[in-house]
Amino acid sequence: MKLVICSRSDKASMNIMGHLLSFDSFEKRTHGDFVFHIGDLFSIVEISERLIYADFIDKRLSEFFDFEEIIFASRHSSKDCRKILTAHVSGNPGKNEFGGKPKSLAKPSPMTIKNYFLALKKRIEKIPEFEITLEATHHGPSEIEKPSAFYEIGSTEEEWVDKSAGEVVAESIFEAIKSDRRDWKIAVGVGGTHYVPRQTEIILETQFTFGHNFAKYTFEELDEEMILKAIQLSDARYLIYDEKSVTSKVKELIKSIYNVEILKTKDAKKFRLQEP
């Protein structure tokens, strides 16, 4: 059972939840501050706290309900006000400026992320003013042991409450939940800007999916221990690095990683998706 976590303090989260509630029949249960909507295919829980500060939420919710994976339905905020639909894993490769703990990573759900992006790709023509992008690992919660990821609408209140965007995201989440495609090649990504454009192209066009991604701005704090932790948590067999953005120091660091196959982004792009 996958559990969608929505925050009552997040307008995009409530927007997405409103559409998800139309996809199944739900039994409503309340446990203190938590409001559960229990369905046959998936369930939803409403919480009051902001999602990025919800450390240990999997353990707290497990007291009341059994589930195997978390989908955080969330807003995305940025100063550039781009109209984007994003997804990413949470965690802090370095400092914890926006929730979570420093140098701590949540466990990713790379198969659901992949199936979500493919579902989103089929629907984005409904809202052509929006872009699809993967993001690098950032913000909390970092203390999450269940597989999880954030699925977001950005970047301002205008987009957060956009009903068409909420519908597309909800439909794509629902398709990803129903999908039984689990044979994707899992990678950890290194390099690129915050919106990791080459990793985004790879997840949309190839057989690869991603767990954690480390953007170039984390390189000063990135070390072997953090990369190995990301590989373990992601269950990754590959490390894909953006050869146009990694520094010589990071290249040497990557060479020290021995338990995965290492690919440049240009080589990863050769593993094209097979037509069904």
Image (spheres, rainbow, N blue to C red):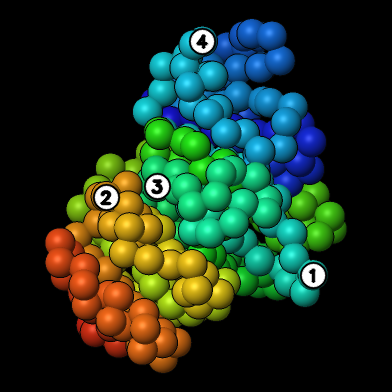
Which numbered disc, 3 or 2, marks the residue that appears first in the sequence? 3
Q: Which residue corresponds to the image point at 59% horizontal and 19% vertical from the top-left?
A: 37
Estimate how packed mark 1 is, as few (under 14), some (14 to 19) or many (20 or more) residues with alpha carbons within 10 Å: few
State if disc 2 and disc 3 touch (CB < 8 Å): no
Image quadrant containing the C terminus: bottom left
Residue holding disc 2: 232
**The quadrant where residue 119 appears:** bottom left
Q: Which mark is residue 108?
A: 3
What residue is pinned by disc 1? 79
List x then y, in percent, for residue 171. 54, 46
Q: Position of residue 92 (x, y in %)?
A: 53, 54
Q: Earlier in the sequence, mark 1 or mark 3?
A: 1
**Distance of mark 2 from mark 4, alpha carbons?**
28 Å
Q: Secondary structure at mark 1?
A: loop
**Kind of residue sitting beneath label 1:** Lys
- Amino acid type assigned to the residue bearing label 3 in the image: Pro
Please name the residue shown 75% across and 65% down the image: 78
Q: In the image shown, does 125 or 46 lie closer to the viewer?
A: 46
Check if mark 2's residue and mark 4's residue have beta carbons within 8 Å: no
Where is 177 relative to 200, above or below?
above
What secondary structure is found at the residue carrying circle 4? loop
How far separated are the C-alphas under marks 1 and 4? 38 Å
Q: N-terminal of the two: label 2 or label 4?
A: 4
> Could you tell me if the residues under marks 2 and 1 are in contact, i.e. CB atoms within 8 Å?
no
**Mark 4 highlights which residue?**
64
In terms of sequence position, does the residue under pointer 3 or pointer 4 come before the other? Answer: 4
Is 106 situated above or below 23?
below
Q: CA distance from mark 1 to mark 3?
A: 26 Å
Q: What amino acid is labelled 4 in the image?
A: Phe
90 lies left or right of 49: left
Going by the numbered disc 2, the residue's amino acid type is: Gln
